[in-house]
Image: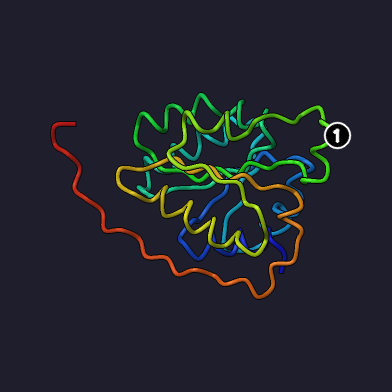
Amino acid sequence: MNGANALVGTLADTGIEVCFANPGTSEMHFLAALETPRIKSVLCLFEGVCTGAADGWYRMRDKPASTLLHLGPGLANGLANIHNARRASSGMVNIVGEHSASHLRYDPPLMSDIEGLARPLSHWVRRAESAQSIAWDTATAVAKASEHPGRIATLILPGDTAWQDASGSATPSFAAQPRKAPDPAR
């Protein structure tokens, strides 16, 4: 099992049913891990569609969906609907691919400050530093997105974290918080 398998398995174990995806080459291991009947993968041709669909999913189902966005530019393409989701208190888990750590020193063309882009519109942002901790990072992201009202959680997935061995990593338990009744004044 690699880091991408651990991530997808944890998404499914924590109740995520769908991933709206616009993958690039840095997310190929995650895309391969989505070949499971446990999560429905929906290919979208633009990241704004991914984030808009995840917002709509939450508004209809009252539970977060996940997105897969390609690097910083992909996240930037989806920010308008992440903004809409945040304003509507919709929960979503954004998985944003990143180049492998060894590749970053070459300043690849699509390299950007993903955390800097994500932070203003996310309630929670974390970079998955290792395949051994990705299950915990993912469970925390889903827990944050599942809070009521919904929250935006962004998990950055470096390519090397996705392909590294995650065998033997502990999978956390996840208990959803009880939902609160909406404020009638809203």
* Residue topped by disc 1: 106
Between 130 and 6, the one lying in front of the other is: 130
In this rendering, position of residue 122 left or right of residue 115: left
Residue 44 x %, y %: 64, 37
* x then y, percent, for residue 162: 72, 55
Question: Above or below — where is 168 with respect to 39?
Answer: below
Answer few, some or many: residues within 10 Å of disc 1's Cα (few below 14, many 20 plus, some between 14 and 19): few
Residue at point 69%, 67% (across, down): 166
- In the displayed orientation, state which residue is furthest to the front: 105
Instruction: Tell me residue 24's x, y (percent).
Output: 75, 40
What's the amino acid at mark 1?
A: Tyr
Closest to the observer: 146 or 32?
146
Query: 100 left or right of 34?
Result: right
Hey, which quadrant is residue 40 in on the image?
bottom right
Name above or below for residue 137 compared with residue 79.
below
User: What residue do we see at 42% from left, 47% from top?
Assistant: 145
Q: How many marks?
A: 1
Taking the view exactly as shown, the residue that stands out farthest to the bottom is: 168
The quarter of the picture where the N terminus appears is: bottom right
Secondary structure of the residue carrying numbered label 1: loop
With 139 as the anchor, is 166 left or right in this view? right
Tell me what residue is drawn at x 55 percent, y 46 percent.
Answer: 126
Residue 163: quadrant of the picture: bottom right
Above or below, comparing residue 55 to residue 181 in the picture: above
Please identify the quadrant where the C terminus is shown.
top left
Relative depth, front residue between 4 and 41: 4
Q: Position of residue 144 (x, y in %)?
A: 41, 49
Q: Which residue in the rendered view is the most extreme toward the right?
A: 106
